[in-house]
Image: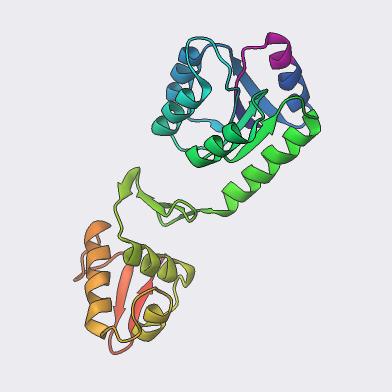
Amino acid sequence: MNKSVLLIEDDLQMQEFIIEYLKDYNFDCTAFTHPKDAIQSFKNNNDYEIIILDLMLPDMDGFDLFRKLKQIKNIPIIISTARGDIGNKIHGFELGADDYLAKPYEPRELVLRIEHILKKNISNKINICNFEIDKENRTVVLDGFPIDFTKIEFEIFMFLINNLNKISSREQILNATSLDENTKNRTIDMHISNIRYKIGDDSKNPIFIKSVWGIGYKFVG
């Protein structure tokens, strides 16, 4: 299945060249010249997997557009621009750019960077038991609703997920987190209770996190 790319580039010749080149590598590229059109399409299309963004655009600075796109949905963005000075590069990466290509560049390099970013992005995402987990951004979504885990709760949740259907002792859970090693067992129990509450798991009849008497817990799926 072809990967969907959103290209925002006001040079029509460059647009056409990138679209045709990416097509040879099984990428479906949809291009826009004007930021407002790109924003509208991005809001309405959930298939886009990566964005190639020029900075020198009509009516809106590329960095401002970058921020707006990230507010809508957090997918990878490669900045593709003639503004190749170090100041712009630093600013782009500070905003959260996944890569920064200064024009002119070889189109094959663009393809390689897209493939690398998408491969990395896939490896950081897990879909299991109705949960969508993004390990890099430390986010968890259950049935479309984001779960607001604390740092420790996320660490415990991920340890249980990574040991799916295995019994994990409280000591093992403790060692897998950044909690102090002198933490009491009841503190682990408290965090498990909070996790259960946030994912709607009834402690008396749990669906996901089962208690194993005298040992610890098991995430079932």
Q: Residue at x 53, y 36 (%)?
A: 91
Q: Is residue 1 visible?
A: no
181 displayed left or right of 1: left
Residue 206 placement (x, y as % from top left): 26, 67
Q: Residue at x 65, y 47 (%)?
A: 119
65 displayed left or right of 118: left
Decide: is 220 above or below 215: above
Indicate the quadrant containing the N terminus: top left, top right, bottom left or bottom right: top right
Decide: is 72 above or below 130: above
Decide: is 35 above or below 3: above
* Span highlighted in magenta in the image: 7-16
Total tally of numbered discs in the picture: 0
Direction bottom: furthest residue: 214
Judging depth in this view, the residue of 139 and 3 nearest the camera is 139
Decide: is 168 above or below 32: below
131 displayed left or right of 58: left
Q: Residue at x 44, y 30 (%)?
A: 67
Direction left: furthest residue: 204
Dividing the picture into quadrants, the one containing residue 150 is bottom left
The reply to whether the magenta stretch includes residue 65 is no
Q: Is residue 22 visible?
A: yes
Q: Residue at x 52, y 22 (%)?
A: 62
Dividing the picture into quadrants, the one containing residue 209 is bottom left
The reply to whether the magenta stretch includes residue 13 is yes
Residue 221 placement (x, y as % from top left): 42, 64
